[in-house]
Amino acid sequence: MKVFISVDMEGISGVVAWDHTEYGKDGYERFRKIMTKEANAAALGAFDAGAQEVVMNDSHGGMRNIVIEELDPRVKLISGSSKPLSMMEGIGPDFDAVIFVGYHSKASSLGVLNHTYSGQVEKYVVEDKVMGETGMNALVAGFYGVPVVFVSGDSEVTAEAIEVLGNVETVAVKEPRSQFAALCLHPEKAQELIREKVAHALRNLSEYKPLTPPAPCTVKVQFHTSGQADRAAIMPGAVRIDPVTVQFTGEDYLEAYRGARTMISLA
C-alpha cells in the first residue's frame, strides 16, 4: 500500500493566529514542530495499517515547514516550492490513498484562519459547487483515481470534508470560537487520534471512493476586488464573468486546476 499525505498548517492543534504560521513570526518555530508531529502521527498510522511507502508533501506557505529529521525515517518528504501540483505535488495513479493533515475550512466560513488558497480568493467554484482546499485537492487525487480517506483540522473543515467527500474518516483537533480563537485538544491527544483514525481508514480502504472530477471541467474564481480579477483575466483562455469573477475551462480537471492557480497567482 502506497499512501500520500498533504500537510497544511492552519488546521494544526493550537494554531489560532497568522503569526503561528508565518516564518519569523511569534510562535512559528513552536507550531512547525507540532505540525511535524501531527504529520508524523498520520504516517505512523499508515505504517500501522501496513503501508509500504508513505510520501508526504509539505503544503503550507513556502512549503518548507516540516522538520524532516523529526519524521519517521521511512517517510519520504517533498519540501519547497514552486511545485506543479502545489499542495498535491507527488500524487499519481500508483497511490492507494490520500490523507489531509492540518487542513482549514474554505474562505468566509466559520473556521479558524479560514481562506481558500490565498487571501485574494472569495470563492473557488468547480461546476457550480463552491470548494475549499479540501475539495480542490481531493479532485486532483480523484483525477488519478485515488480516494481521500482522512482529513484533520478544526471542526469546520471536518464537516466540510464530510459534505464534499461523503464517507471519510476525520479528526477535529480544535473547535472554533472565532476566526482567531479555538478550543484545542492537547497536541499529544490530537496526534494519538490522528494515528488511530488514519490506521482505521486504511484498514478499511475499500469503503472509500475517489472524488471524480468532470471532463471537460470549468473552474470559476471569485476574487475580493475587481482589480484582482483584472489581473487574473490577463491569462490566455480566461473568461471574465462579472466584475470580480473569472473562469477557465480545461480539457480535464488538472488543466482547469492549473489554470485557476495561475489566475490566482496573477491576481
Image: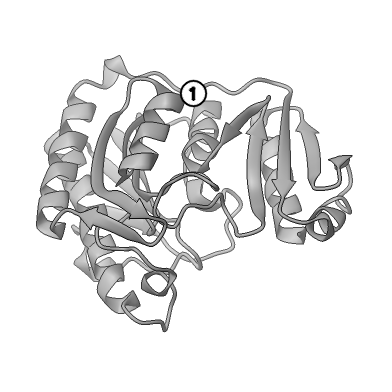
Q: Residues within 10 Å of mark 1 (few under 14, many from 20)?
A: many
Q: Quadrant of residue 172?
A: top left
Q: Position of residue 207 (x, y in %)?
A: 29, 15
| Picture layout, residue 95 above or below residue 14 | above
Point 59% across, 62% down: residue: 82
| Picture layout, residue 7 above or below residue 198 | below
For the question of whether residue 137 can be seen, the reply is yes
Tell me: 47 left or right of 248: left
Disc 1 marks which residue? 211
Q: Quadrant of residue 39?
A: bottom left
What is the quadrant of the N terminus in the image? top left
Point 38% across, 55% down: residue: 178
Please name the amino acid that badge 1 sits on.
Answer: Leu
Q: Position of residue 57 (x, y in %)?
A: 41, 53
Q: Position of residue 43 (x, y in %)?
A: 22, 47
Q: Quadrant of residue 128?
A: top right
Q: Position of residue 30 (x, y in %)?
A: 25, 75
Point 64% across, 48% down: residue: 122
Residue toward you, 6 or 263:
263
For mark 1, give the secondary structure.
loop
Tell me: 167 left or right of 254: left
For the question of whether residue 99 can be seen, the reply is no
